[in-house]
Image: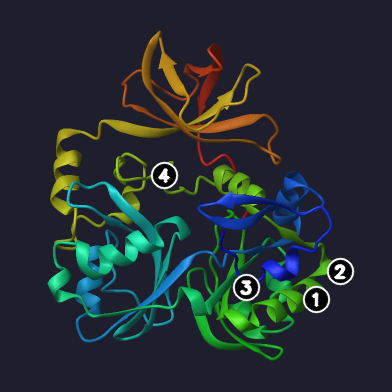
């Protein structure tokens, strides 16, 4: 089992519960439980250890053109000091992974990769894609980099006590060489919770010190340590995709309603022809939000029916601490008469349970 640089810090926390997440032993929740951590992020702040995520640096004269080919979103107009959400696709238009690309210099980029996909992503970037003969320098820095996520409406207040300049940072911007007491870090105004917040990169050896500094400063403001359980319920409420669920090597970005991150007019990129063809012929499936009407716990992979016919499956579901009740996303056939308010059936343990099609995301923060 793999451990992040913070494992020896939080394994001694009272009430912490660990789970196996892609061969990483990570906290599911701490003493207060998932709901209290979720609510802390919505009302105050939560601190997550996401050091299991992968990171690599792509650099050199051909780095920009290479990433422009690998990514569905535009990289050419990305300014130094800004980052952007994008996907990498296979030639058939399905998804290799969704990633963040940081432009650190004119020819230097930092990529953040999903933990479970890091090895696959690096292989794809370095040698498995159709233009790998043009690959620039790619350095895997995952083992030497730690990543913390400080999220919630009071995240800025907590971090500004160390880094006053964070107050003026725009969403999807970052600053390098920020001093958090005696720790140097890259600070990015990004997150995976639907709230304002920051993701903080530092050297692995500095992670325990950074965690302690942030927790000490934030505790009087309601900051709680938070685990994967709250991270999942928060991202579901905010309709943030998870690889293997809303996107995968069997689902295209267009089917996952992520077309805004696919720039079909930017020029050639891997998967563009297939996505252009899918758009022209009609995207066959769509991701729809559901609110359970009947009692029952929907789970990923459960079949969804409409008027007695199977039309898709649940991709993700949660009991919402913010809204109450069970909410889910389903990847289903595009049907003309399927509208908001339509009632579908989810098969839960062999029993039919009704769910209503609703607007998503289920939660949007004010401002």
**Disc 1 or 4, which lies upstream in sequence?**
1
Is residue 179 among what the camera can see?
Answer: yes
The residue labelled by disc 3 is 5
Mark 3 neighbour class, 10 Å CA radius: few under 14, some 14 to 19, many 20 or more: many
The residue labelled by disc 2 is 220
Q: Which mark is residue 244?
A: 4
Q: Nearer the viewer, mark 2 or mark 3?
A: 3
Residue 134 rendering spot, x and y as whole percentages: 15, 75
Q: In this view, does 227 lie above or below 164?
A: above
> SS for tag 1?
helix
**Disc 3 or 4, which lies upstream in sequence?**
3
Quarter of the figure with residue 10: bottom right
Residue 266 rendering spot, x and y as whole percentages: 19, 63
- Looking at the figure, which quarter contains the C terminus? bottom right
Is 66 positioned to the left or the right of 334 in the image? left
Contact (Cβ within 8 Å) of mark 2 with mark 3: no
Mark 1 neighbour class, 10 Å CA radius: few under 14, some 14 to 19, many 20 or more: some
> SS for tag 2?
helix
Quarter of the figure with residue 214: bottom right
The residue labelled by disc 1 is 217
Label 3 vs label 1: CA separation? 21 Å
Residue at 20% of width from left, 75% of height from top?
135
Q: Which of marks 1 and 4 is in front?
A: 4
Label 2 vs label 3: CA separation? 25 Å
């Amino acid at each position: 089992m793999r451990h992040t640089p913070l494992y020896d810090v939080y394994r001694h926390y009272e009430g912490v519960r660990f789970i196996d997440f892609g061969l990483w032993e990570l906290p599911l929740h701490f003493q207060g439980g998932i709901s209290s951590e979720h609510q802390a992020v919505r009302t105050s702040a939560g601190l997550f250890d996401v050091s299991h995520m992968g990171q690599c640096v792509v650099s050199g004269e051909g780095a920009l053109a290479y990433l422009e080919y690998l990514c569905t979103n535009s990289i050419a107009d990305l300014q130094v000091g800004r980052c952007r959400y994008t996907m990498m696709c296979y030639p058939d238009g399905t998804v290799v992974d969704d990633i963040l690309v940081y432009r650190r210099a004119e020819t230097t980029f930092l990529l953040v990769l999903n933990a479970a996909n890091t090895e696959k992503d690096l292989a794809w970037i370095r040698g498995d894609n159709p233009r790998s003969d043009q690959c620039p320098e790619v350095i895997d820095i995952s083992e030497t980099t730690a990543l913390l996520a400080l999220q919630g409406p009071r995240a800025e207040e907590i971090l500004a006590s160390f880094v006053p300049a964070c107050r003026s940072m725009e969403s999807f911007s970052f600053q390098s060489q920020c001093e958090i007491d005696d720790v140097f870090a890259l600070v990015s105004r990004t997150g995976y919770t639907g709230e304002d917040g920051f993701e903080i990169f530092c050297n692995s050896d500095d992670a325990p010190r950074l965690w302690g500094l942030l927790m000490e400063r934030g505790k009087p403001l309601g900051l709680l340590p938070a685990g994967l359980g709250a991270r999942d319920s928060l991202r579901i409420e905010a309709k943030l995709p998870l690889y293997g669920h809303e996107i995968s090597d069997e689902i295209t970005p267009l089917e996952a309603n992520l077309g805004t991150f696919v720039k079909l007019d930017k020029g050639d990129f891997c998967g563009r022809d297939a996505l252009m063809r899918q758009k022209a012929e009609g995207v066959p499936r769509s991701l729809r939000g559901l609110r359970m009407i009947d009692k029952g716990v929907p789970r990923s992979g459960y079949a969804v029916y409409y008027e007695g016919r199977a039309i898709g499956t649940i991709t993700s579901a949660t009991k919402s601490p913010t809204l109450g009740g069970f909410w889910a996303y389903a990847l289903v056939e595009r049907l003309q008469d399927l509208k908001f308010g339509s009632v579908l059936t989810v098969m839960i343990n062999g029993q039919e349970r009704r769910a209503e099609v609703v607007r998503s995301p289920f939660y949007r923060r004010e401002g």
